[in-house]
Amino acid sequence: MDVNGTKHIVALCGSQRDGSRTRHALEQALGAAETKGATTDLVDLSTLDLPVFDPDQSDTGDAKKLRQLVRSADGVLLGSPVYHGSYSSVLKTAIDYCGFDEFEETTVGLLVVAGGGFPTPALEHLRSVARSLNAWVLPHQVAIPNAHSTFEAGELTDEALVQRVEALGTEIVDYAGVESYPESTTACAVPTAD
């Protein structure tokens, strides 16, 4: 968060495909985040030099640049196409170059695009990885199944999915910078026996 209280949201796009539907969906989520007053960056991983992660060469290529971009964020959106039931290797490599310094106590939102059916396993895999880095992962997540029929000319055509993507963009701003769970206002005292 900058001195004016403006939150900064970074999206990592795990698709290298030209005309990527994942990229389009992340752009839409970031547009909603900007409407909420946030500044945003879309990190197109296909433009970064990130070889397969080698812990003995963790500063190779654009690794330092990537870590600085993620570290600058109050909230991070992780977006990926589905490959063989999970998220893309390019996103895995990017996350491998990062660690607790980049993700711990950072609010993370998840978005996955599938050419086929509902991509639940890929979302679960991303959630597990983000939680292992002590990130705050939003309960709201976006799964876009059957992407060939839900996009037209790069735009989502399913209104319910549009609303889910935009909700992800607004929620990542609303919950960015969360440091702890809020006190419950619905908790009630357990009655005691007399």
Image (spheres, rainbow, N blue to C red):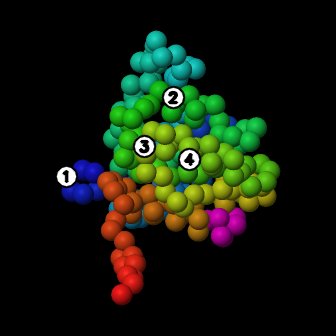
Q: Are marks 1 and 4 in contact (CB under 8 Å)?
A: no
Question: Of helix, strand and loop, which one carries label 2?
Answer: helix
The kind of residue on which mark 2 rests is Asp
Q: Earlier in the sequence, mark 4 or mark 3?
A: 4
Which residue position is annotated with label 3? 134
Residue name at image x 41 percent, y 18 percent:
59
- Rendered image quadrant of residue 33: bottom left
The kind of residue on which mark 3 rests is Asn
Furthest residue in direction bottom, as rendered: 194
Residue name at image x 51 percent, y 28 percent:
96
Q: Earlier in the sequence, mark 2 or mark 4?
A: 2
Asked if residue 164 is positioned above or below residue 14 in the image, the reply reads below
Q: Earlier in the sequence, mark 1 or mark 3?
A: 1
Asked if residue 85 is positioned above or below residue 144 in the image, the reply reads above
The kind of residue on which mark 1 rests is Val
Alpha carbon separation for disc pair 4 and 3: 11 Å
User: What is the number of the mark on residue 96?
Assistant: 2
Which residue position is annotated with label 1? 3
Q: Which residues are magenta?
A: 157-162
Quadrant containing the C terminus in the rendered view: bottom left
Question: Of helix, strand and loop, which one carries label 1?
Answer: loop
